[in-house]
Image (tube, rainbow, N blue to C red):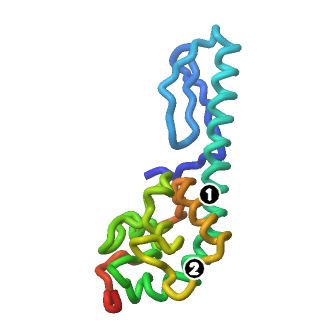
Amino acid sequence: SPVCDLGRLNIPRKSSGSTTSISNGCRHLSLMIPDSMQALRAVVMFAVALLSALSVATATEGEAFFENRIRPLLAEQCYRCHGQDKQKSGLRVDSRMALLRGGKIGVAIVPGKPDESLLLDAVNHGDVVQLPPKRKLWRRQIADLTQWIAMGAPWPGEQADLSAPADTQGD
């Protein structure tokens, strides 16, 4: 499949007729604008460019937030018991797909819905489970997880092996 370059906007002129087709490399607008509508074409091109830039900024911010705040937190606090080698309660937290799949208790995260995410209940030492078990995370760490889930839980690249759990001992 073609690589999606959201940073560029292609506005080719079609040679068959007097229309313009607009594309940003991933999303193609089936929009044919007659040359006689120069002002409208300029406004539409500007709007498409602006929306493309905003989606790139949002994706980049979410990915940067994940890489700077969430991945290190998960690696430091969670992977030992919920990583590739060991999955207590059948839960793995080293990939977005694994968090969406959840463990024995249920789905760990609901992207965009922090209040429905069991992971947040657990790190807040709620009624169902308390994680990490020995001490509650810092408020800033919980706020970061909450913000990340509210952002839709962006996770650049799924690199974790999602094979069957290696060890579910110590549930």
x, y percent for residue 52: 62, 40
**Residue occupying the point 62% across, 13% down:** 35
Pointer 2 residue: 136
**From the viewer's perspective, is residue 145 above or below residue 129?**
above
Count of residue discs? 2
Three-letter amino acid code of the residue under disc 2: Lys
Say which residue appears at 57% left-offset and 29% top-offset. Answer: 22
Q: Looking at the rendered structure, which numbered label has been put on residue 62?
A: 1
Tell which of 27 and 139 is nearer to you.
Answer: 139
Which mark sits nearer the N-terminus, 2 or 1? 1
Which quarter shows the C terminus? bottom left
Q: Residues within 10 Å of mark 1 (few under 14, many from 20)?
A: many
Q: Residue at x 70, y 14 (%)?
A: 39
Q: Position of residue 5 (x, y in %)?
A: 59, 48
Residue at disc 2, secondary structure: loop
Q: Is residue 156 shown to the viewer in this render?
A: yes
**Circle 2 or circle 1, nearest the eye:** 2
Judge the density around disc 2: few (<14), some (14-19), many (≥20) Cα neighbours within 10 Å: some
The answer to which quarter of the image holds residue 51 is top right
Judge from the rendering whether residue 107 lies leftward or rightward of residue 117; answer left or right.
left
